[in-house]
Amino acid sequence: MSGVLNPKLEVRVEAIGHERQPVVVIDDCLADFDGWRAAAAGERFAAIGPYYPGVRAHVAVDVAERLRAELAPVVG
């Protein structure tokens, strides 16, 4: 099975806001964006509480761990 990340991804750090906080931006991150989008479309999204402005869906532990493992060397 191929990697989760696109080998041609581009990483940069932007300074955001008045405090100039660093934010890592990763363009073209996923190797199979359409596959991720299709998988997400099949999930059930819901609000998780009053303090998070949006909805989330469950991500399987093995999928999250693989993504984390591949992103770790990219973002340090």
Image: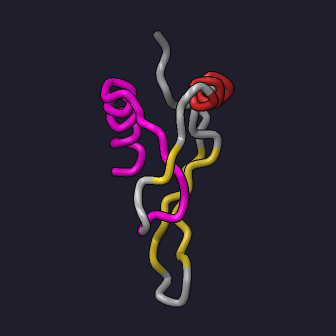
Is residue 41 rendered to the left or right of residue 23?
right
Judging depth in this view, the residue of 52 and 23 nearest the camera is 52
Residue in view at x 49 percent, y 53 percent: 47
Q: Would you identify the image quadrant in which residue 37 lies?
A: top right
Is residue 60 rendered to the left or right of residue 4?
left
Q: Can residue 50 be seen by looking at this rendering?
A: yes
Magenta run includes residue 60: yes
Judging depth in this view, the residue of 26 and 43 nearest the camera is 43
Residue 12: x %, y % from top left: 55, 58
Display colour scheme: secondary structure
Q: Point out the stretch of residues depicted in magenta.
A: 51-76
Magenta run includes residue 59: yes
Q: Can residue 7 be seen by looking at this rendering?
A: no
Residue in view at x 42 percent, y 68 percent: 51
Please tell me whether residue 40 is drawn above or below residue 21 in the rendered image: above
Residue 2: x %, y % from top left: 49, 15
Residue 63: x %, y % from top left: 39, 26
Residue furthest to the right? 34
Residue in view at x 32 percent, y 24 percent: 62
Judging depth in this view, the residue of 28 and 59 nearest the camera is 59
Please tell me whether residue 20 is drawn above or below residue 29 in the rendered image: below
Residue furthest to the bottom? 18
Q: Would you identify the image quadrant in which residue 54 lies?
A: bottom right
